[in-house]
Image (cartoon, rainbow, N blue to C red):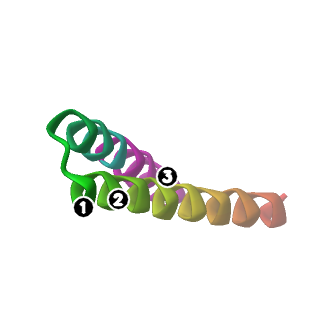
Amino acid sequence: MATRDKAKNTTQQAKGKLEEVAGKISGDDSLRARGKADQTKGNLKQAGEKVKDAFKK
């Protein structure tokens, strides 16, 4: 299950990066902000998974 969660988090980070870049190119500040927010959410979730892994050992 943890591997699936990590993959979902990485996907969310990548999606956020694409949205951010698309927002920069098109000049859409809300799309850029939404992309940054998705990246941050993915990073926080990924950090949570790392903490869980550390306690499993």
Read off the residue under disc 2: 33
Read off the residue under disc 1: 30
Residue in the picture at 44% in, 46% down: 10
Give the quadrant of the C terminus: bottom right
The amino acid type of the residue labelled 1 equals Ser
Instruction: Kindly state the secondary structure of the residue where label 3 is placed.
Output: helix
Read off the residue under disc 3: 6
Dot 2 and dot 1 residues touching (CB under 8 Å): yes
**Magenta segment:** 1-15
User: Magenta segment: does it hold 2?
Assistant: yes
Residue in the picture at 30% in, 51% down: 32
Within 10 Å of disc 3 (Cα), the crowding (few <14, some 14-19, many 20+) is: some
Within 10 Å of disc 2 (Cα), the crowding (few <14, some 14-19, many 20+) is: some
Residue in the picture at 21% in, 38% down: 22
User: Magenta segment: does it hold 6?
Assistant: yes
- Determine the CA span between mark 2 and mark 3: 23 Å
- Determine the CA span between mark 2 and mark 1: 5 Å
Q: Is residue 43 above or below residue 27?
A: below
Q: Is residue 21 left or right of residue 27?
A: right
| Mark found first going from the N terminus, 3 or 1 | 3
- Determine the CA span between mark 3 and mark 1: 27 Å
Instruction: Name the foreground residue: 48 vs 27.
Output: 27
Residue in the picture at 21% in, 33% down: 25
Q: Is residue 20 left or right of residue 13?
A: left
Quarter assignment of residue 55: bottom right
Instruction: Kindly state the secondary structure of the residue where label 2 is placed.
Output: helix
